[in-house]
Image: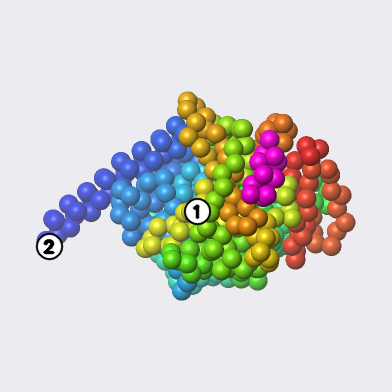
């Protein structure tokens, strides 16, 4: 290939990428009227294709997450997150020009570059990843895209960056189960922490701001991230179910499950019970799923994923994961999941599908609870409240809230006074 050809190919790639980038930024704006101008401008500016070169200059601007590294068990350990989800978290952060920002979970480096654009001029971004190979990859992508001023460090982000503190904002882009004390300690007065937090197996992106001795949520929205590793990692919650298909089950809070009983229950007879309710979209069904998961703390949550094939992120096989009633007693095991039906018009009926010997009883119970959720006005992610306190503090629990005790934090979660 001569020099002329090389230049021609490079300019075709950059033209394709530029057009796709402009489309992605416009689509994000069209889908979310609340998307602020600086965030849209950042998506229109940062060349994502330089951060995920493996997917090509056009596909890089799809509103999709791309897995960029898997562990030896085939479970993804790093991905470039879905742009629509990144936009939500950037809004939750409420970034301003000049902010000093700490990101935990550099991954591809794309989010760090977006933050660098939004906080310019005079802003500062420090990004930490625990994986050296990813740190080196992100450093070289950031340099290629003209963001050499973003500082990328290889360390366990659970300890933050004491030398760079205080920060105006801390954002975590790996799924957390515990809340590392360094993140709060390294925030300046008026600072904000945004992180994907596991709430009994459902992940919520939560914005937190100081309120007295604790931290109160400013917003929450459902999300799905690869799990955080290192000193503050949650209990290993993934099991490989070696049934006919190699399924992966994620069980909330590391509850032990009898794997063969789970496989047998999922492969056996099912019973579908109508709830008598209809929902307008997936997010309303997600609200019911969240409410049941939080308000039924005696049940364990089980998420069943299809196998990881190539670069595809695993998808839940069951519509929204399941609720597992008694994980230790195969004789009475019941599993239930919400099942959107086929209603006409703008809404679909909701049923509860039960599996296993205890499946019918569990489905009946959850169908009744679903009707109660409706009577309460359908509480969901938009109005859930989370109050976080240091571990060991005696915190008051309002009616309608449950306490999740983690090694470093006490997390009160729920819908106060809507029991
Ligand atoms: C979803 S990816 C981050 C996406 C990234 N922000 C981007 O724009 O591409 C999560 C990252 O968190 C990293 N990670 C996991 N545990 C960590 C820890 N304890 N400290 C720092 N990084 C961690 C993983 O290596 C992975 O790269």
Callout 1: helix, strand or loop?
loop
Determine the CA span between mark 2 and mark 1.
46 Å
Q: Position of residue 29 (x, y in %)?
A: 46, 34
Bounds of the magenta span?
Answer: 360-371
Residue at image mark 1: 316
Q: Position of residue 156 (x, y in %)?
A: 60, 69
Residue at 58% from the left image edge and 68% from the top image edge: 259
The answer to whether residue 133 is left or right of residue 55 is right
Decide whether residue 368 is among the magenta residues.
Answer: yes
Main SS type for the magenta part?
A: helix
Residue at image mark 2: 1
Q: Position of residue 175 (x, y in %)?
A: 59, 58
Judge depth for marks 2 and 1 and give the one in front.
1
Residue at 85% from the left image edge and 53% from the top image edge: 395
Residue at 57% from the left image edge and 47% from the top image edge: 271
Decide whether residue 117 is among the magenta residues.
Answer: no
Mark 1 Cβ inside 8 Å of ligand 1? no
Crowding near pointer 1: few (<14 within 10 Å), some, many (20+)?
some
Residue at 57% from the left image edge and 63% from the top image edge: 262
Q: Position of residue 45 (x, y in %)?
A: 41, 44
Residue 88 visible in the displayed image: no
Residue 84 visible in the displayed image: yes
First reached walking from the N terminus: tag 2 or tag 1: 2
The quarter in which the N terminus is drawn is bottom left
Q: Camera-side residue: 90 or 222?
A: 222
Q: Camera-side residue: 16 or 235?
A: 235
The answer to whether residue 407 is left or right of residue 313 is right
The quarter in which the C terminus is drawn is top right
């Amino acid at each position: 290939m001569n020099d002329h050809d090389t230049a021609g190919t490079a300019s075709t790639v950059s033209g394709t990428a530029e057009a796709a980038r402009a489309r992605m930024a416009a689509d994000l704006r069209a889908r979310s009227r609340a998307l602020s101008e600086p965030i849209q401008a950042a998506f229109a500016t940062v060349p994502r294709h330089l951060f995920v070169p493996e997917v090509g200059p056009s596909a890089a601007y799809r509103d999709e997450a791309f897995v960029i590294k898997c562990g030896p068990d085939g479970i993804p350990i790093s991905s470039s997150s879905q742009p629509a989800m990144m936009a939500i978290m950037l809004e939750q952060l409420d970034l301003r020009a000049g902010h000093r920002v700490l990101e935990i979970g550099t991954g591809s480096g794309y989010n760090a570059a977006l933050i660098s654009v939004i906080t310019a001029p005079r802003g500062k971004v420090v990004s930490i990843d625990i994986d050296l190979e990813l740190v080196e990859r992100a450093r070289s992508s950031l340099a290629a895209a003209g963001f050499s001023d973003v500082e990328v460090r290889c360390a366990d982000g659970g300890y933050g960056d004491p030398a760079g503190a205080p920060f105006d904002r801390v954002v975590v882009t790996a799924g957390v189960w515990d809340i590392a004390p360094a993140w709060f300690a390294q925030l300046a007065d008026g600072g904000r922490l945004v992180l994907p937090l596991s709430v009994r197996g459902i992940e919520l992106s939560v914005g937190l701001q100081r309120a007295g001795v604790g931290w109160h949520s400013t917003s929450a929205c459902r999300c799905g991230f690869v799990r955080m590793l290192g000193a503050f990692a949650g209990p290993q919650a993934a099991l490989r179910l070696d049934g006919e298909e190699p399924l992966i089950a994620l069980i909330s809070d590391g509850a032990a499950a009898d794997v063969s009983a789970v496989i047998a229950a999922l492969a056996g007879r099912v019973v579908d019970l109508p709830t008598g309710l209809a929902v307008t979209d997936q997010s309303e069904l997600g609200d019911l799923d969240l409410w049941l998961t939080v308000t039924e703390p005696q049940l364990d949550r089980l998420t069943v994923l299809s196998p990881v094939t190539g670069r595809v992120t695993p998808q839940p096989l069951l519509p929204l994961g399941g609720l597992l009633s008694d994980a230790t007693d195969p004789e009475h095991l019941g599993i239930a999941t919400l099942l959107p039906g086929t209603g006409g018009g703008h809404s679909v009926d909701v049923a509860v599908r039960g599996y296993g010997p205890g499946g019918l009883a569990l489905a009946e119970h959850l169908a009744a609870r679903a009707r109660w959720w409706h009577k309460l006005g359908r509480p969901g992610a938009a109005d859930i409240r989370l109050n976080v306190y240091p571990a060991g503090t005696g915190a008051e629990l309002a009616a309608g809230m449950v306490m999740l005790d983690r090694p470093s934090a006490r997390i009160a979660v729920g819908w106060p006074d809507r029991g």
